[in-house]
Amino acid sequence: MNGSLQTQTQPATCQDDALAGFREILQVTRPGADVELIRRAYDVAASWHQGQTRMSGDPYITHPLAVATILAELGSDDQMLCAAMLHDTTEDTPYTLAALSGEFGAEVAALVAGTIALDQVKGNLPQVLAAVRSADTRVLAIKVADRLHNMRTVEFIAHAKQLRKSRESLDIFAPVASLLSMDTIGAELETLAYATMKRNRHARSVSGRLLIAMTALLPVATRTRWCEEWLGELHTLPSRRDRTSFAIHTMLGIPRLAYTVRNPAPGRRRAG
Amino acid sequence: MKYAVKMTGPVQQVLRAMLEDAAAPRYGLQISKQADLEPGTLYPVMARLEGVGWVESSWEDPDLSIKDGRPRRRYYQLTKDGAEQARLALAEISGRREKRRSSLSAAQPGPLGAAL
């Protein structure tokens, strides 16, 4: 049952720099870390992921290593770092949770299992958020780091998937990051997600850019909503002329809209 | 009777268009066509109607837009209360207009629109 692969392969040299970087960070943030154990987790993951590549073309192991590096920067413990290294092995390779548990202990296995369980949460946003809130905070931290690296390399995946990941990052992962006081990570996630959404075809067009620029007149909290709504409308218009006309007419209404949004209800009713 | 929304021309156009099928969710461009309003006029009206709770808006199911690789659409729908209030308000306005028209034709022909 027990895996026998731990020393089978030395990974190719192209990740050596990244590995050295990880070590250096670890020395600063976790001088007492069990470097040998973590290195073993890296080796096992590297051997199982051997031959697999990321969408960017990089060897797959660069991803778990990057996730572990993000966590090392935060001073995460040995088990979390091992779990980060191994987090995709049992899903994407023949390596089993039982074997992982045998080699690295039940705690690491539980962390890996926790991240997999979170991937399988289905339902609408409130349901997902409820599941996320009840999850183990160490598992959540690994997921947030995982998502951060995925968003850093989001340009390599299909456009539709980019939008989905960005949406999830804003709706789920950024709030979770701030819940865990991972504030810098939360901010980076938001920046990456917005940047991705703005790379959308229509957001790059003249009409889209004008509209986005004009939303500066609106209260900050409402800008994303209107931006997204208008980009959605632009998308439904077939010709450039229609889109330009839409953009101009919408812009003309923005000052009035800004006033309305700031003074929502002159009357008393606010029921539904 | 006083309503939560000032019943301007564009507000009436939007409400009439939406009441034609009160339960149907629509996105901005659809309403803009049906109500024959430019988007610059439409969105402030929608924000106003939403602000007073006559209209609700929500994002479409993200899976649909993701499948097509496009941004999500925002859909507007009359609330139950909103539809009721809107019907009353519009009926009152057309009733007033009717009355004015008959009194105008009965009495001397004067300058139009002096009544309101």
Image: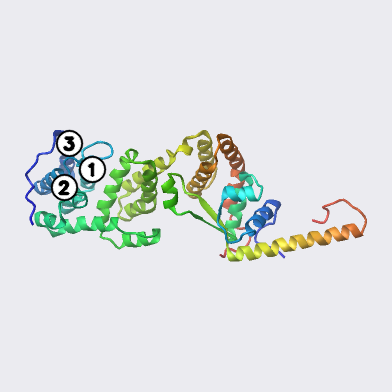
Q: Are marks 2 and 1 on the same chain?
A: yes
Crowding at dot 1, Cα within 10 Å, few <14 / some 14-19 / many 20+, comes out as many
Residue neighbourhood size for the residue with mark 2, other residues' Cα within 10 Å, grouped as few (<14), some (14–19), many (≥20):
some
What separation in Å lies between label 2 and label 1 (alpha carbons)? 21 Å
Question: Disc 3 designates what residue?
Answer: A15
Instruction: Determine whether A191 is above or below A206 in the image.
Output: below
The Cα atoms of the two marked residues, 1 and 3, are separated by: 11 Å
Q: Are marks 1 and 3 on the same chain?
A: yes
* Residue at x 60%, y 66% (from the top left corner): B81
Q: Is residue A96 left or right of A118 when viewed as pictured?
A: left
Q: Determine which quarter of the picture holds residue A269.
A: bottom right
Mark 3 falls within which chain? A
Disc 1 target residue: A63
**Subunit ID for the residue under disc 1:** A
A240, above or below B110, in the image: above
Q: Nearer the viewer, residue A70 or A28?
A: A70
Identify which amino acid the numbered label 3 is placed on.
Answer: Gln
Which residue is more in the foreground, A134 or A94? A94
Q: Position of residue B7 (x, y in %)?
A: 69, 56
Residue A92 x, y percent position in the rendering: 21, 49
On screen, B14 above or below A195?
below
> Which numbered disc, 3 or 2, marks the residue closer to the eye?
3
- Give the crowd class for mark 3: few <14, some 14-19, many >=20 residues within 10 Å: some
Mark number displayed over residue A30: 2
**What is the CA distance from the residue labelled 3 to the residue labelled 2?**
21 Å
